[in-house]
Image (cartoon, rainbow, N blue to C red):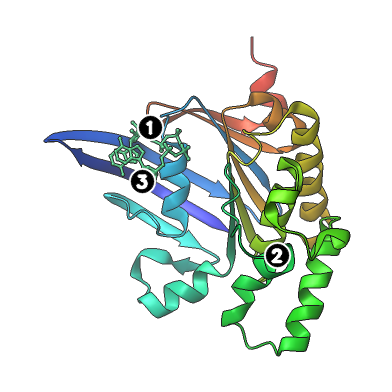
């Protein structure tokens, strides 16, 4: 599903070369809930931004659903990106639009009619348990509810992959658990492949079937959950 090979990412910062990602290879299979865990600055965000070419790697190859992402034209890239949903720590909702409008936003570029879009939005809100909130505004919602809206929006174009970049980091433990449970349910029910970036080991333990541990740009440990956490 996702195959990253020998990825390097370096930045030029005030004349200094910063290596954010160093020689990382990572394979995510369809149906995985793959955790990428590590401290702040380990290179997690940079690595996952490579998956949808928000970040071009300095070296290495990137394949998503059999496509070489680095070779796509900008039009092909737009199509490829609709297959990858993203959610973030700060939700990134449009505050002056209703919940329904926020979820509808990515559908504006689709071929669906207005009525079909409306039906789709209702379905997506139902999926994340927010049907009652359709006409509310983001400010009226709790953090967990806002993240559910962001998830519904990320799923609007029926992506195969959902990337969660510290999506639970601003939430309390109980809300975190409910969001993680939702991701697990979506993985099961929709066959959604999930890449979960987090500095919270507990989140990874809760739902991931595979884990890569990053430190200073490198993967220092990886495997299935049992193998990693049973090491002395
Ligand atoms: P994480 O997601 O694990 O917190 P990041 O991928 O955000 O780590 O950052 C990894 C390293 O790369 C950090 O040292 C960060 O400062 C650096 N970095 C990330 N993006 C840039 C950029 N656009 N320009 C310069 N340095 C960057
Ligand atoms: P996250 O919270 O996801 O780890 P950051 O707050 O580290 O993200 O970074 C936010 C954005 O700033 C990203 O696009 C990242 O590439 C960029 N960035 C991070 N570190 C630096 C840096 N040292 N110089 C320039 N840009 C950076």
The numbered mark, 3 or 2, whose residue comes first in the sequence reads 3
In this rendering, is residue 80 above or below 174?
A: below
Q: Image quadrant of residue 174?
A: top right
| Other-residue count near label 1 (Cα within 10 Å), few / some / many at <14 / 14–19 / ≥20 | many
Cβ atoms at labels 2 and 1 below 8 Å apart: no
* Local secondary structure at mark 1: loop
- Residue 60 placement (x, y as % from top left): 33, 51
Cβ atoms at labels 3 and 2 below 8 Å apart: no
Q: CA distance from mark 1 to mark 3?
A: 10 Å
Label 1 beta carbon within 8 A of ligand 1: yes
Of 207 and 124, the residue lying toward us: 124
- Foreground disc of the pair 2, 1: 2
| Other-residue count near label 3 (Cα within 10 Å), few / some / many at <14 / 14–19 / ≥20 | many
Residue 7's disc is: 3
Q: Image quadrant of residue 136?
A: bottom right
The residue pinned by badge 1 equals: 217
- Residue 158 placement (x, y as % from top left): 68, 70
* Local secondary structure at mark 2: loop
Judge from the rendering whether residue 213 lies leftward or rightward of residue 131; answer left or right: left
The residue pinned by badge 2 equals: 98
């Amino acid at each position: 599903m996702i195959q990253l090979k020998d990825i390097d990412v370096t930045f030029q910062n005030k004349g200094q070369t910063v290596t954010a990602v160093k020689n990382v290879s990572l394979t995510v299979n369809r149906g995985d809930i793959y955790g990428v865990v590590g401290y702040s600055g380990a290179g997690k965000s940079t690595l996952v931004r490579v998956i949808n070419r928000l970040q071009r790697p300095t070296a290495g190859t990137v394949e998503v659903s059999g496509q070489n992402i680095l070779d796509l034209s900008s039009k092909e890239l737009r199509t490829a990106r609709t297959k990858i949903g993203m959610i973030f720590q700060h939700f990134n909702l449009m505050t002056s639009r209703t919940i329904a409008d926020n979820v509808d936003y990515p559908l504006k570029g689709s071929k669906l009619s207005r009525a079909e879009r409306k039906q789709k939005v209702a379905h997506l809100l139902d999926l994340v348990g927010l049907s009652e909130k359709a006409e509310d505004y983001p400010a009226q919602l709790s953090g967990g509810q806002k993240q559910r809206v962001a998830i519904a929006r990320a799923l609007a174009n029926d992506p195969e992959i959902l990337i969660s970049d510290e999506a639970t980091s601003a939430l309390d433990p109980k809300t975190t658990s409910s969001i993680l449970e939702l991701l697990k349910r979506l993985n099961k029910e929709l066959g959604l492949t999930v890449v979960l970036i987090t500095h919270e080991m507990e989140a990874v333990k809760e739902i991931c079937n595979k884990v890569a541990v990053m430190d200073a740009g490198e993967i220092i440990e990886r495997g299935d959950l049992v193998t990693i956490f049973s090491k002395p």
